Image (cartoon, helix red, strand yellow):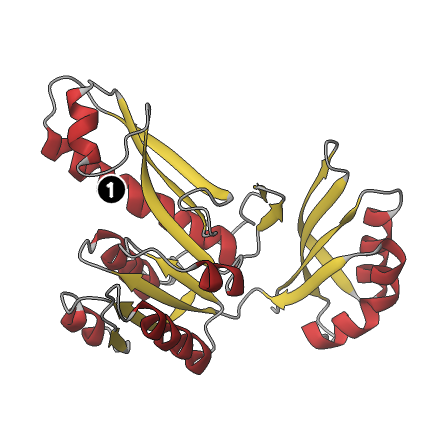
Amino acid sequence: MSKYALTVTCKSTRGIVAGISGFLAEQGCHITDSAQFDDAETGNFFMRISFSPEEDVAVSPDGLTETFGEIAKRFGMTYHFFSETERMKVIVMVSRFGHCLNDLLYRCRIGALPVEIVAVISNHMDYQKVVVNHDIPFHCIKVTKENKPQAERRIMEVVEETGAELVVLARYMQILSDEMCQKMSGRIINIHHSFLPSFKGANPYKQAFERGVKLIGATSHYVTADLDEGPIIEQDTVRVTHAQSPSDYVSLGRDVEAQVLARAIHAHIHRRVFLNGNKTVVFPASPGSYASERMG
């Protein structure tokens, strides 16, 4: 059975839901899941609907997009129809911490994260064999103060050559330029540790240990020109105690980083994330969207 979805953003007004549901009914489509949010503070309305056409009905995202134009114009909508079975093309960027990369490769292999990793880019050679063994192209692009503009141009060439729709910074330890952040706005996801209280600079886990922190965690967000301050997609924490060592903090931190990044990517590729100023609206996953094709 074909499965499609529609995402909508517009100013809140009367009749939006009726207009959308009525349109889908006229097209011979059955709504299987729906989520909406009306932001009283900004006056913005967000909606995501999953639907399937009846057996004797043939539809396509392009055809629906064209037919939906009149309704979208009436409400001033930004909208997008897409197939829920089509895998988004993703580039993963990594430096020397491989826990997030390895986790993403495994989830992708078993179908738990339905993406097509079209390339892995690194400024080091550490994970070349791992990546190549997964039949994924590996690009080592060295970055220095002197060659940074040229390196970023090469990165963007890989993005364009592969048709990647999303770039994931899986512990990529280089700061991207403002120009690249703006060009790829809403298409780059990062992961970093998050502490209560916050610690910056070298050895954050050691600093947290010395202060007796009881919660460590991770934050995944969209990349902007403001370092580590982009709109947040996903967060989580794990408890630590006085009996654990700085090395324990690091290991626990890596686990939660991998989980949080995977959940953020899952939300993005299913178009469950909507930018709302400096914040995001993140709808719950549709039924069945976490199911894996196989185990192991």
Q: Identify which residue is drawn at 16% across, 39% down.
A: 251
Up the image or down, 71 lies above or below 65; here it is above
Question: Badge 1, how many Cα within 10 Å: few under 14, some, many 20+?
Answer: some
**In the image shown, does 277 or 291 lie closer to the viewer?**
277
* Image x and y of residue 114, in percent: 43, 63
Q: Residue 81 appears at what percent x and percent y?
A: 68, 65
The picture quadrant where one finds residue 250 is: top left
Residue at 12% of width from left, 24% of height from top? 244
Which quadrant, please, contains the C terminus?
bottom left
Q: Is residue 62 left or right of residue 230?
A: right
Q: Residue at x 13, y 65 (%)?
A: 126
264 relative to 145 in the view: left or right: right
x and y, in percent, of residue 249 in the image: 17, 32
Count of number-bearing discs:
1
Farthest residue, direction front: 146
Asked whether residue 15 appears in the rendered view, the answer is yes
Q: Dot 1: what SS?
A: helix
Q: Based on the displayed image, in which of its 4 quarters is residue 42 positioned?
A: top right
Task: Name the kind of residue labelled 1 in the image.
Answer: Asp
Q: Compare residues 159 and 251 and report the one nearer the observer.
A: 159
Which residue is label 1 attached to?
A: 255
Q: Is residue 223 left or right of residue 52?
A: left
